[in-house]
Amino acid sequence: MNHRILQLNARLSNQIAAGEVVERPASVVKELLENSLDANSKRISINIEAGGTKLIRITDDGNGVHPDDLTLALSRHATSKIIDVGDLEAVKTLGFRGEALASMASVARLTLTSNVTAEAENGWCITVSGSDMKATVSPAPHPRGTTVEVKDLFFNTPARRKFLRTTKTEMQKIEDVIRKVSLSHTDVMITLQHNGKSVRQYIAAKSEADTLQRVASVFGKSFLENSIYLEEDQGSSENGMRLKGWIGLPTYSRSQADQQYFYVNGRVIRDKLVTHAVKQGYQDVLYHGRHPVFALFFELEPRTVDVNVHPTKNEVRFRESRQVHDFLFRAIHRALAEVRPESTDVVQPGSEATPVQSNMSFRTGSGGWSRGMNTGIREQSALYGKLLQTPEGSDITSDPALPMVDGDVPPLGYAVAQLHGIYILAQNSRGMVIVDMHAAHERITYERMKRASDGEGVKMQPLLVPLSISVSEQECAAAEYHQSELLKLGLDLQQASDESIMVRAIPAMLNSTGAEPLIRDVLADLIEYGSTARVTQHRDEILSTMACHGSVRANRRLTIPEMNALLRDMEETERSGQCNHGRPTWAEQSIAELDSLFLRGR
Ligand code: ADP
Ligand code: MG
């Protein structure tokens, strides 16, 4: 290795760049799709052979490349998307690095054919060859738009070729790339063929229903019934932050974080800060270790987000990371808090709008929820045991305590009976409702305790003997920097030396042995995300345990008015669709579903 310095040839330097950008066929598809979208294409067709190792061909109907620019299109550091550093700091296109085509052309046999006019005979085609990647341009008929053909991927880089997996795996990765794009560009038609057979067809969405159809084709139909659509707008703020999309109900969670799509200005990204904010939004309603499902589209002023972090452009950096974190967290948290039994128009038995899926299909707390305040609910006394006025009469038995179910019926209806000391059986305008009485009461008690605790503020408890904790220099600095905020959380921390802090007071709810790990976690959060919810989380865990013990146990007899009061409280309580552990608290079966059980009306 003791020879003199030499300039690398064009192909080799492009191959080095390709190391980061072109990992496998799916990365080629991603870069080519991004180019087609940046060219405003409305129809994109993708042809793959042998999992992309033999051929990847993408044809679009976009703006095309001017014949004089063809050579530049395949050279590194050449792009039509940015001109100066000002543009780089406010990128609005998916591409901007000007290296994808050059990288691909260095590790495969690449041909680009394009036409900027409407007459097919004006098309031109370009290929490159040799170590200097010399270009050859020749006329080639092509309708307006561009076709890029990438053949024999990694034919000249055997080490890379060895890392390729089975055709099936590579196809899955390609489909994954297309799926992500299909969600953010619903107005573009995308088709995929593998070995001459049609695999996927995303029709351009023309209406809201078409868009929903696309969401359903990515997540499955049940996702729409089990999710909330949210829209949060701070567009007028300096950052211009806007968030919209679908978040799965807590009861629709998964064991893997495999159905999470997050877009920043139309670009799908993976980001620790975002994951953390979303997780925190779900805190309190999700079973430990479960992962929410979501497709969220986040828009903000391009100047406040740096997309030039990694060659694959899958990562971003937010200038105002703390504001972004808070905004995302609040939007999701609020949307989930509004999940509670919903009043719908009175549906006449037998005229169910939704078809019955199976004889035993129950609509549970996880289904049919919608975001938004309940308007038809009356103020209710929160105290159980206090008698509740219910309408007189009954339509099913002669029991005078049973109410009529016609007219203004609350979402969860009126209690009819208690089953096995565990469930409340109720009837509403749609049919029958079953409530897990302990789980529901636990959530109500918990939410009430949290509200009470919020109202009081955090009580501080001074330590008789201040606790000394050794920390890193960075943690020490964070403790000092966030001092006033920490005080609001009930933590009085003082810097003792460069690498230790004195704890003078802790939240009254905490005992001093639990303080040290909590403080470490709090400081780690503050360093990483600029904010922390640890103290509230910790308080909530304590309250949740208290709520569990303070709630109606199984086998306690409740009177009909007590049961009705519980139902009314559920309708008013935030997050009452799930118990504190994320299980549903109620289920519903419609009259139509009951009828079908008995083959009635068929
Ligand atoms: P980048 O997308 O970062 O600019 P690329 O190497 O992917 O870099 O593409 C280089 C240039 O070639 C682009 O800036 C664009 O002008 C042009 N180009 C590539 N693909 C297409 C396409 N499908 N339609 C129109 N122009 C394209
Ligand atoms: Mg590109």
Image: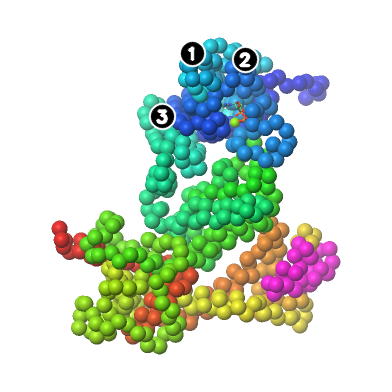
Earlier sequence position, callout 1 versus callout 2: 1
Lower sequence index among marks 3 and 1: 1
The residue drawn where x is 54% and y is 21% is 116
Residue in front for this viewpoint, 72 or 207:
207
Residue 28 can be seen, yes or no: no
Image quarter (top left, top right, bottom left or bottom right) of the N terminus = top right
Amino acid carrying mark 2 in the image: Ala
User: Where 221 sits versus 541, above or below?
Assistant: above
**Label 3 near ligand 1 (CB < 8 Å):** no
Quarter of the image for residue 362 reads bottom left
Q: Position of residue 183 (x, y in %)?
A: 48, 43
Return the residue at label 3. Answer: 194
- Residue behind mark 2: 135
Instruction: Choose mark 2 or mark 3, whichever is in front.
Output: 2
Q: Position of residue 293 (x, y in %)?
A: 48, 53
Q: CA distance from mark 3 to mark 1?
A: 29 Å
Magenta highlight range: 478-503
Q: Is residue 76 magenta?
A: no
Describe the element under mark 2 as helix, strand or loop: strand
Q: For the residue marked with disc 1, what is the amino acid?
A: Glu
